[in-house]
Amino acid sequence: MKWMILADSSCELRELGGCGEGVSFATVPMKIRVGGREFVDNAALDVPQMLEAMRNWNGPSTTACPSPEEWAEKFLQADKSIAVTISSNLSGSYNSAMAAKDMVLESHPEKQIHVVDSLSTGGEMALILWKIRDMVAAGASFEEVRAAAENEPERLQVLFGLASFDNLVKNGRVGRLVGFLAGRLNMRVVGAGSPQGTIEMLHKPRGETRMLALILEEMAKRGYTGKSPAFITHCLNENGAKLLRNGIRAKWPSAEVFIAPTSGLTSFYAEEQGLIVGY
């Protein structure tokens, strides 16, 4: 029986090593629309080029989730499929995947398909996918994998730090004057994903050093112990990601910390120098 583990491209992963025989991994791309151009969030995407196009475009940019047909194409390739999507409160990806599930099961009722709303994005999604992979590799049943995957969003959390507000200004989320002053004053934002899968703004520090310190404080306040992995993704800010990794390891010496660049979709939200950490 062939397994398919899949996610929309906001999971940050382009590959999922260690899947084993009979198990495939795939991502279904989000799209970013800047003026008259569309950027497809796949392995070929040039993120710096996309960000430059966003800076040079005076109007708002938008995103589009995968179509039901794109999800269905993947579901049809396996007997058992587990899909993980970005929070349903941030995108229509979950609803699109659910529509695809209904379409496929109508014509192929023998297939087993489950869609997980991560209530998050970025590294938290990657951690859910790793859990699914490990359980499949260990020989768990479809129902066991499904139940465990559904429990992961309640256990995991995500924090983020922003350094740029240009996209927020252009999309009307932040006033132009506030965005201008934030840039001049070297302001940052530290935020978190809520249990409902929405975004909460927590702090507005000045400078990256204070931003990183507040992320570490929030991780401790929210119960992180270092006994589980942390997954940091960065938008053209590898140095900041390494500093955060060093901070996590100093505070929790046993913690495993992974670093990866943001995908196109998460780069759209995090913007240049942004950081996201799932744990």
Image (cartoon, helix red, strand yellow):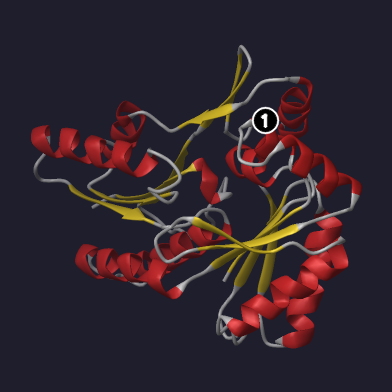
Q: Residue at x 68, y 72 (%)?
A: 257
Determine crowd level at label 1: few under 14, some 14-19, many 20+ residues with C-alpha closer than 10 A. some
Q: Nearer the viewer, residue 71 or 80?
A: 71
Query: Looking at the image, which residue sits at the far top?
Result: 36
Q: Nearer the viewer, residue 183 or 236?
A: 183
Q: Quadrant of residue 93?
A: top left
Q: Which residue is mark 1?
A: 170
Q: Quadrant of residue 245?
A: bottom right
Q: Quadrant of residue 143?
A: bottom left
- In the rendered image, residue 221, in percent from the top left (x then y), is placed at 61, 83
Q: In what quadrant of the picture does the C terminus appear?
A: bottom right
Q: Residue at x 77, y 27 (%)?
A: 55
Amino acid type at mark 1: Lys
- Left or right: residue 123 versus residue 236 is left
Q: Residue at x 71, y 28 (%)?
A: 50
- In the rendered image, residue 145, in percent from the top left (x then y), is placed at 29, 66
Q: Secondary structure at mark 1?
A: helix
- In the rendered image, residue 243, in percent from the top left (x then y), is placed at 84, 68
Is residue 128 at all visible to an observer of this figure? yes
Is residue 263 at all visible to an observer of this figure? no
Q: Residue at x 45, y 45 (%)?
A: 90
- Left or right: residue 152 versus residue 223 is left
Q: Is residue 39 above or below residue 114?
A: above
How many numbered marks does the figure carry?
1
- In the rendered image, residue 19, in percent from the top left (x then y), is placed at 45, 58
Q: Is residue 130 above or below residue 99?
A: below
- Left or right: residue 25 versus residue 43 is left
- Left or right: residue 23 versus residue 172 is left
